[in-house]
Image (cartoon, rainbow, N blue to C red):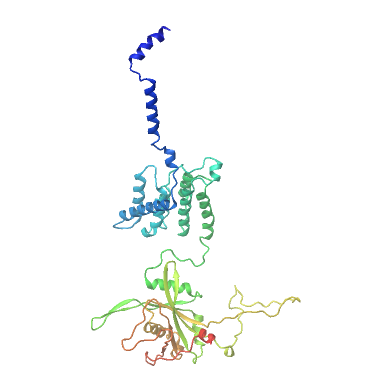
Amino acid sequence: MRCSRSLLPLLLRSGRPASGQTNQNHRQHQALRHLHSSPASAKSQPVSAHEHRTSKDTSLTTHEDLFEKMAKESKTKATFNKVIEVFIKQDIRRRGHVEFIYAALKKMPEFGVERDLSVYNKLLDVFPKEVFIPRNFIQRMYNHYPKQQECGVQLLEQMETYGVLPNVESKVLLLQIFGEKSHPIRKYQRIMYWFPKFKHINPFPVPMVLPEDPVDLARFSLTRIADDLDAKVTVYQLPCTDTTETGEEITRPHLVGIQSPSQMELLAKHDVNRPVFVEGPFPLWLRKTCVHYYVLRADPTPLHLKVEEPYDPERCLQYPLQLDLDLDRDLGDEESFDVDDLDDGPVFAMCMTSQGNQATLNQWISGLQQNNPILGQVPTLFRLDAGPQKPQESSQSPQPHPETQTEAFQPGEGADETVEEEPRRSHRMKQ
């Protein structure tokens, strides 16, 4: 009692507001609180898909601009790694790392690092570590952090596209980022299972870096096309630049041909009264490089002129061309077979040149006459299509389409004489 009596005067002296004034202040405070929105309500506001897509495109454009600013002078591997280091040092939390990795994957072919394993590992290192690992079976079942996992799978798919085999460092980085039971780890396991199986399955591999010399590239391409290991490659002309008496520079193209002994034998048995044709150009793709070649061929031999040669059993001992088996036939066995025999005619030689005009191909035919003297007696017709090189135009009169014009080359006659060409086999079939 004494304590309460002593405290009562102190409370009255302290100037405490009355109860009516307290209620009024409380109402004003409640009215002010209604003017502010809570953080939860701000987060719950819906965002349209257009705004989300626009923000993503803007972030991708920003990261691409970062690559362009850093690579104003030269686009090399060192510049690419420098851009990655700049992004890592910008923010310790690596915010926007998914958009940055997508932009980096898009820019890799421009910098020439699309087949560099160390650059891919450096991009994997951009992901924050031990953040996207699922902690329980429920998170693992519901695809924990799908956006980041999809980005990791996309990075591995680009490695698969360019034939880059991951190493142990790639596996350790994926385990630190996504955990053991994740989609990127399963993608890594599939790559490591199939890549070693298909690495050396191609019996005719193409090197990653093709020869830059056109003569070496033509030699490699013709050897790849030829179906005979005994085929011989001949360089008829090397690329050079000559100067005429008037001071005009003339660039001579390269001319490389190939012919096998069996093709020489077929050409020697060819009928002199039937012409041979120079056709082309036909494309051949070696990775991302396209080259063109020309062939010397003839029409199929008519059925009434065909002569069946006796079969030589010792021609091929490993793969016999004929089997004579004395087997008993059953009632259900058929003695006749429906076989579609398509004869496109023999191919006598092939060549490659940078200028597929008639003058250059005439030099090829002249070079073939040294080992094939029958070409001096057989008329040669040219069926040249509009290839990579523009056809030479005459200033006197317009030339007809290359497919409708055919010129015959004879060693003792002028090169400007023309011979009417028979319609193509496809045209005859249509008639």
Residue at image coords 53%, 50%: 186
| Apparent side of residue 94 relative to residue 337 in the rendered image (left or right) | left
Residue 127 in the image, given as x and y percentages of width and height: 43, 46
Tell which residue pokes out farthest to the left in this image: 246
Q: Is residue 118 visible?
A: no
Residue 29 in the image, given as x and y percentages of width and height: 38, 30
Q: Is residue 197 above or below residue 6?
A: below
| Apparent side of residue 154 relative to residue 310 in the rendered image (left or right) | left
Along the viewing direction, whichever of 105 and 114 lies nearer the viewer: 105
Q: Is residue 23 visible?
A: yes
Along the viewing direction, whichever of 242 and 123 lies nearer the viewer: 123
Q: Is residue 350 above or below residue 375?
A: above
Number of dots carrying numbers: 0
Tell which residue pokes out farthest to the front in this image: 20
Which of the 4 image quadrants contains residue 1? Answer: top left
Tell which residue pokes out farthest to the top in this image: 2
Residue at image coords 49%, 43%: 133
Residue at image coords 34%, 48%: 86
Q: Is residue 216 above or below residue 271?
A: above
Along the viewing direction, whichever of 80 and 50 lies nearer the viewer: 50
Residue 333 in the image, given as x and y percentages of width and height: 72, 76
Residue 245 in the image, given as x and y percentages of width and height: 24, 84
